[in-house]
Image: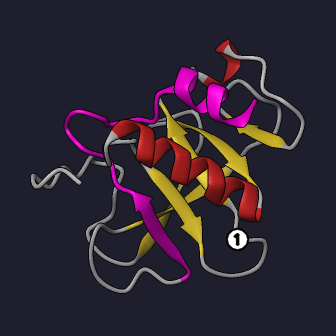
Amino acid sequence: MTETIHRPSWVPLAGHQLHLAGVHFDAVRIDGIRGELVADWLVEASGDDAGPIVCEAGGGRWVYFLLAPGEVAAYDWPLGVQRHSGGTRTVTYVGIPALEGNTWPLRWYSAPTATAPYVDAGALLGAVT
């Protein structure tokens, strides 16, 4: 991973915080092992600079891929991929962990960096299809 810490304004200093999807980022949510496999592929393909990916530690173990605002609507996502953006009728909040400290039940699978502030939507689509 990149040595330089990059903390966008929407990443809390401690703990975790809910943010409205579509404002600072759009989100693609994938369930459990499928989401983890997609995250593995993106991290491996990008040389550990995949952009922000958040994982839940319990429950369905959802994996959230954070894209630039407005990007979710630009792609035709396959079944099993949930889209969260400002352009949908449903208001969705996504939990964002701090970069350090106790953030349970959330953790960064891949943190945002200056060179990858968001997940590349085209690469993500390629990984899930």
Q: Quadrant of the N terminus?
A: bottom left
In the rendered view, does 62 fall on the left or right side of 49?
right
In the rendered view, does 46 fall on the left or right side of 3?
right
| Residue at (52% x, 73% y) in the render | 106
Q: Nearer the viewer, residue 89 or 69?
A: 69
In magenta segment, residue 126: yes
Is residue 86 at least partly visible in the picture?
A: no
**In the rendering, at what x and y percent does residue 78 appear?**
84, 30
Residue 12 vertical position relative to residue 77 in the rendered view, above or below:
below
Residue 112 vertical position relative to residue 55 in the rendered view, above or below:
above
Residue 30 vertical position relative to residue 58 in the rendered view, above or below:
above
Q: In which quarter of the image is the C terminus?
A: top right
Residue 93 vertical position relative to residue 45 in the rendered view, above or below:
below
| Residue at (70% x, 63% y) in the render | 62
In magenta segment, residue 42: no
Q: Is mark 1 on a helix, strand or loop?
A: loop
**In the rendering, at what x and y percent does residue 59 appear?**
76, 79
Q: Going by the picture, which residue comes out furthest to the top?
A: 74
Which residue is denoted by mark 1 in the rendering? Answer: 61
In the rendered view, does 41 fall on the left or right side of 61?
left
**Count of numbered marks:** 1
How many C-alpha atoms fall within 10 Å of the one at disc 1: few (<14), some, or many (≥20)?
Answer: some
**In the rendering, at what x and y percent does residue 119 appear?**
46, 35
For residue 95, what is the image quadrant?
A: bottom right
Q: Going by the picture, which residue comes out furthest to the right?
A: 79
Q: Which amino acid does label 1 sit on?
A: Arg
In the rendered view, does 69 fall on the left or right side of 108?
right
**In the rendering, at what x and y percent does residue 90 appear?**
81, 40
| Residue at (60% x, 52% y) in the render | 64
Residue stretch in magenta: 105-129
| Residue at (44% x, 37% y) in the render | 24
For residue 125, what is the image quadrant?
A: top right
